[in-house]
Image: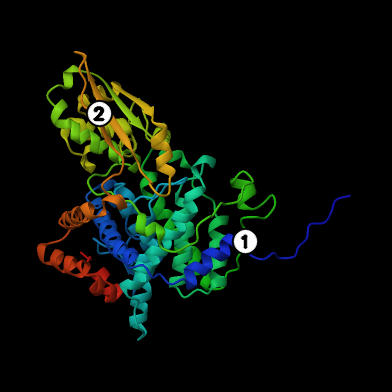
Amino acid sequence: MTTPTSNNRPEPDQVLVEIAMYAANHTINSEEAYQTARHCLMDTLGCGLLALRYPECTKLLGPTVKGTYVPNGARVPGTAYQLDPITAAFNIGCMIRWLDYNDTWLAAEWGHPSDNLGGILAVADYISRNNIAEGKAPLTMRDVLTAMIKAHEIQGVLALENSFNRVGLDHVILVKVASTAVVTALLGGTQEEIIAAVSQAWLDGHSLRTYRHSPNTGSRKSWAAGDATSRAVRLALMAVQGEMGYPSALSAPGWGFYDVLYKGNSFAINRGFDSYVMENVLFKIAYPAEFHGQTAVECAMQLHPFVKDRLHEIDKIVLTTHESALRIIDKTGTLHNPADRDHCLQYMVAIGLLFGNLTADHYEDEAAQDPRIDELRLKMVTAEEPAYSQDYLDPNKRSIANAIQVYFTDGTTSEKKEVEYPIGHRRRRTEAIPLLQRKFESNLRTCFPAKQIQRIIEQCGDQQTLESTPVHQFVDLFVI
């Protein structure tokens, strides 16, 4: 005789409650977090603007139905589109992630917390324009920066000790969850409505990592985060309209996320939500390389002057790296498209050795036809350094170390170049910020005339000025 299943509604899972309490009520007191969020905003928008140079990205942008215009809709920077906030979130999120050049968080799970800006900026702009139309006060960019800090924190803290890639799920699941929480809060959702919305995010169908790994690597990895943050906006809008939630979405025996998708394990969360992630986030400053390979590219560039005239004498190239890099970007064989190439450690290193530089254009088909790239790739040997892998996970170090040494046919070798911390690391922040600002200005020049660029730089260059600016006025600075 079977025991009847109780139909009593449980209390919400504690993870849902903690996320909702933080999104709805927590006050951010860290000035460092707000300063970093301002730089993150600049860098993230700049990455999106640069992506508009690439037709494979722009073909995905615009309204779902051609010609649709939404009164008081959210604007898409660098374009003339004015869209509903769900579609605008996809557009902005797609632009941001296209070139793999925005910020990064590395832990048990990795990802790009600024992917959440797609939903945050679209919703904040939409709210502000409608508030103005109704005679109400708009949101300010301080609200956007606060939402960014909180989205970074939710995504990053969940990633610290919980590996979704090891169960085959893509890291954009955390974009969906984080965006859902902070966007629901922006929309005025109560703690209970945020719980309902976040429960829906965990219940959703989730992206597999198939499109990130050989032999299927493809351009979906460049729009998956836009898809996730736009889905979050949809769930948030439903929740504030009263759509119910599911209190044991994670823990329900047999049917919850833990049992169905997480091998029966619950999440390990050993750090409270505050502003740690924004303060420690990694910026991609110098080149658009998958972050596990950033320091390898820096090593390659240091070696470039010493090997550029001896390429025909190279016998082998030893790449010493950490376990996550080996699992994600160690790749041999044919590379089929730009998305395949920018996730190949050997390809990125070859470009650095050959040219002493790496840009997004180096991943395109024209550049990839250079036969010397594959000749160098064939001479590369990868090996794990256990200390690198250990320091990668150390919360007090969070290094992303790589080393390269070149061996020549005459028995000589290059110096072994080792870089532990990429230039975008918190430990190199002083060195990085002037370069980040130059990167932002360079990206602005791909879209706007000088006078418009100057207005944008003035608005973004001062913390107090930016924070007090109404969101819709800020976004209008980026309209074509």
Task: Say which residue appears at 46% left-offset and 59% top-offset.
Answer: 154
Compared across the picture, whether 366 is left or right of 153 comes to: left
Q: Position of residue 329 (x, y in %)?
A: 37, 35
- Report the amino acid beneath label 1: Asp
Q: Nearer the viewer, mark 2 or mark 1?
A: 2
Number of residues whose C-alpha sits closer than 10 Å to that of mark 2, classed few (under 14), some (14–19) or many (20 or more): some
Number of residues whose C-alpha sits closer than 10 Å to that of mark 1, classed few (under 14), some (14–19) or many (20 or more): some
Residue indicated by mark 1: 13
Residue indicated by mark 2: 416
Q: Is residue 213 above or below residue 160?
A: above
* Disc number for residue 109: none
Front residue of 224/272: it is 272
Q: Position of residue 311 (x, y in %)?
A: 17, 22
Front residue of 112/71: it is 112
Compared across the picture, whether 163 is left or right of 54 comes to: right
The quadrant where residue 203 appears: bottom right
- Report the amino acid beneath label 2: Lys
Name the element at disc 2. Answer: loop
Q: Quadrant of the C terminus?
A: bottom left
- Looking at this rendering, what residue extends furthest in the bottom direction? 135
The quadrant where residue 250 appears: bottom right
Sequence-wise, which precedes: disc 2 or disc 1? 1
What is the basis of the colouring in this image? rainbow
Q: Position of residue 400 (x, y in %)?
A: 35, 41
Task: Say which residue appears at 57% left-offset and 52% top-offset.
Answer: 267
